[in-house]
Amino acid sequence: MKQAKPSVVHFHASGPLVALVGNPNCGKTALFNLLTDSKQKVANYAGVTVERKEGRFKTASDKTIRVLDLPGTYSLHPRSPDERVTHDVLYGNAIGEKRPDYVVCVVDATNLRRSLRLVIAVQRLGIPCMVALNMTDMAEQRGVHIDEQALARELGVPVVRTVGVRQGGEAELRAMLENVGTLSQASVGAHLSDADPAVQSHTDLDHERVRQILSKLGLDDIIPHIVSDKIDRVVLHPVVGPSLLALILFLVFQAVFAWANVPMDMIKDGTEWLGETVTGLLPEGWLQSLIVNGIIAGAGGVVVFLPQILILFFFILILEESGYLPRAAFLLDRLMGGVGLSGRSFIPLLSSFACAIPGIMAARTIANPRDRMVTILIAPLMTCSARLPVYALLIGAFIPQREVWGFLELQGLVLFALYAAGIIGALAVAWVLKRFTAKSQIRTLMMELPSYHLPTIRNVLTGLKQRVVIFMSRVGGIIMIMTIALWFLASYPGAPEGATGAAIEYSFAGYIGKALAVVFEPIGFNWQISIALVPGMAAREVAVSALGTVYALAASSSDTAEALAPLIAQQWSLATALSLLAWYVFAPQCLSTLATVKRETGGWKMPVIMLTYLFGLAYLASFITYRVALACGLG
């Protein structure tokens, strides 16, 4: 086999392109964030829906370096869309993407045995590279001391130490990239294409080479993480583990109501004060109505639920940061196997509790195409944060705030039941699909269980900040647009002379709502609810602001200052409220989610299937709920 000549980086005027490559959970993206700070742009790779993250930074000599954060992979034999992108970029096969000038292999210092196989595979491609020995602080805490100079000699490439979760932890890497234009490296073997049969034989030899390297460094003995092993004896116990998971989820939903009361009251008081102030400053007319009944009533009705959303995300981030989430996937693997999925679907489905869009995108990591498609279809049944304002409004209006059994919040119990209903519904749909599509497939779950560690406060706060920004941008963007549009439809045309009803009944919105009410009357929805469902297709939260706008314009002057919850409590039956809750457990997805499904699946077939089955499921659930409630005398 002909040996490749030493490779030297030749970069363009825009700066060399440096690719970060590594296994999942090796801290690669944390290093990318430290290097590039806010100078990042996110798009999609041409022809696929996998995210492309590129950033830039300037070295001490004012040289611009472009950094590409490639999706995590365990090898260069792709099994999922994410791994396929990394493979194609490194082999120079990616559409519209140049081959990197230099590769930084980010390895987990606590698990060199697994990480070094990828390093050797990258070396074989003939691209100059170096190794960033990440998580060195955690490795030393466990008694793993790595001589990076000895490792560099064994590999024949530069090795630097990094700590991706610490400010300044990228300093050595940044300094090394200062000289990226002059670094060169003799390739290990020839540059092979992925079609070369020698690739497989090299793969067989890589394991032995890694073993030899670890033996020379005195690291061939696997050092267990004693603390993690002890915790896992409890967390992964076949009886205690699932019980603990259920308890954790239960306590999270209790906290969503118990902790949020004070900040929610403050936001309500602030919204009411702002509305009264604007009313006093502006003369009565269309402008006052737009600002008070449209913008303030609409946006304020959604912002009030921000504390509950942040509390929910706080717990999700803590569980993710601590290393518990992969354990939860492991615990649920048997349950999910019963409905034709593997535990690998758990993390995309859990992400869907935040929003179905990242959950659907996270399904890219599922190698089995059939499992990936089913996960996408059932992801919307996980109760996303956009539904939380609707749940909180209805629970607050119709469920009394009292303790059950002396220590549990009744409202929290109802919220937990709604989330559970969504999960049960998703499992039921997956089971039905299994009967038609699984074809007796046997699935095994292979998943890395990272060591437990204390959550990083900085990462948790960053995650919460991002959630606030996303939520408020929706309030100031699509929610505001839909609220103003609904205000216009609900305000014009005005009531005719001699009209006896509220002016909104004679508006465009009133006529649309009454037409829709014919369809929704069998499940207990009045025309106000029917009209609120329409803008709710743009974003779930808009349904709350839409109800606020409709009832603010429909109420008498003495009622306008009242909160929305008491108004609907007076005008709706409990059967209607329960029916609406059942509708939102299964409600058809917002337009942005359907667009994401179309992009992820490459056509309109799956979005149409999703929209149709969710509408039918929601209508059936609401119909049964409403009729049973009426039969129980709750009408």
Image (cartoon, rainbow, N blue to C red):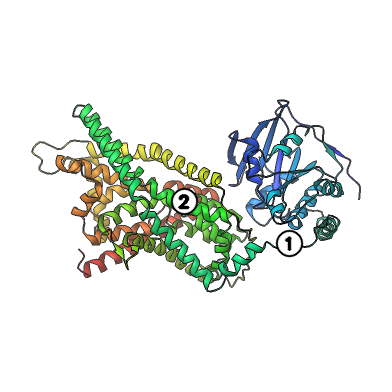
Give the left or right position of residue 382, taking residue 26 as reference: left
Q: Estimate the x, y position of residue 382 in percent, counting from the top left.
A: 45, 58
Q: Secondary structure at mark 2?
A: helix
- Report the front residue among 316 and 172: 172
Q: Which residue is mark 1?
A: 223
Task: Identify residue type, mark 1.
Answer: Ile
Q: Quadrant of residue 575?
A: bottom left
Q: Nearer the viewer, residue 117 or 275?
A: 275
Decide if residue 64 is in sight here: yes
Q: Tag 1's secondary structure?
A: loop
Provide residue 431's location: percent of width, then percent of height. 49, 69
Query: Is residue 417 toward the left or the right of residue 274 in the image?
Result: right
**Relative horizontal placement of residue 467, taking residue 161 as reference (left or right):** left
Given the current orientation, which residue lies at the most extreme right position? 2
Vertical side of 573 occupied by 284: above or below: above
Can I make out residue 355 in this image? no
For residue 29, the mark is: none
Is tag 2's residue or tag 1's residue first in the polypeptide sequence? 1
| Residue 209 spot, x, y in % from top left | 84, 57
Amino acid type of the residue tagged 2 in the rendering: Phe
Residue picked out by circle 2: 313
* Tag 2 and tag 1, C-beta contact below 8 Å: no
Q: Is residue 508 above or below residue 571?
A: above
Residue 206 in the image: x percent, y percent? 82, 57
